[in-house]
Amino acid sequence: MKRSDAIWLLMLPVYMALDTLRHEASHALAGWIFGGNVLEISFLPNRNLGHFSFGYTVLTVELNWLIVGAPFIVDLIVFALALWLCLRYQQMPRWLWVNVVILGMFLPALDTYQAWWGSQDRMNDVANLLRMMSPWLVHGCFLLALRFYAIGIIIVWVQRAPKPMPRDPLSLLAAGNGIGRQLYQQLHQRPNGVGIPVS
């Protein structure tokens, strides 16, 4: 991480609000697909439900595992798309790369992790999923997703990391065209330098 990237930390409240909006909009879309209406949606921190929450959605439909789990399915889709973008367009500008990684990779991974980890001591989406489905299946899916997120983030981070400078100064010349490349190739063909034509 570069020092200039620290400016994006000031955007953290905006990133968190956007991530919460994506989470709650996923519930709303899934509820609408199953025939419900959205009575209320909030994506800002509040205590409207009697306890602190980053957001909530009120639907007029009976909840099923797809409505409750929709944000985590969307997390996977967003993460996979961001991973593809980072690997496909490796030369994207730094500011764009930072935002794709934060919004498309770190926040979906964080959303999934905090919901899964927080299901032990509070009522949240994963706690609801654990009541609707086999705990083995729920925990297995979340652990698999978290492993995918960790591997993807490491791959993107390593791929974007600055490459070390070559130790051989002539290899710098070889990067260009013309006599530098020829000299580099000839030296490596004849390590003792014998027989190299100089013009």
Image: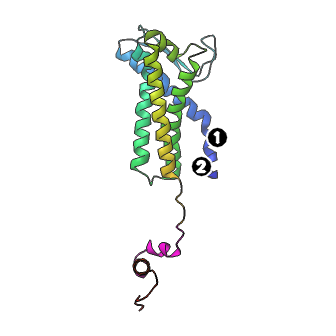
Q: Position of residue 111 (x, y in %)?
A: 53, 28
- In reply to whether residue 174 is colored magenta, the answer given is yes
Residue 182 lies in quadrant = bottom left
Question: On the rendered structure, is 46 left or right of 39?
Answer: right
Between 47 and 90, the one lying in front of the other is: 90
- What is the number of the mark on residue 133? none
Q: Can residue 71 be seen by looking at this rendering?
A: no
* 123 versus 86 height, above or below: above
Give the magenta range.
166-180
Kindly identify which residue carries mark 2: 1
Label number found at residue 10: 1
- Tell me the amino acid under the disc marked 2: Met
The residue located at (45%, 29%) in the rendering is: 145
Q: Quadrant of the C terminus?
A: bottom left
Amino acid found under the numbered disc labelled 1: Leu
The residue located at (59%, 49%) in the rendering is: 1
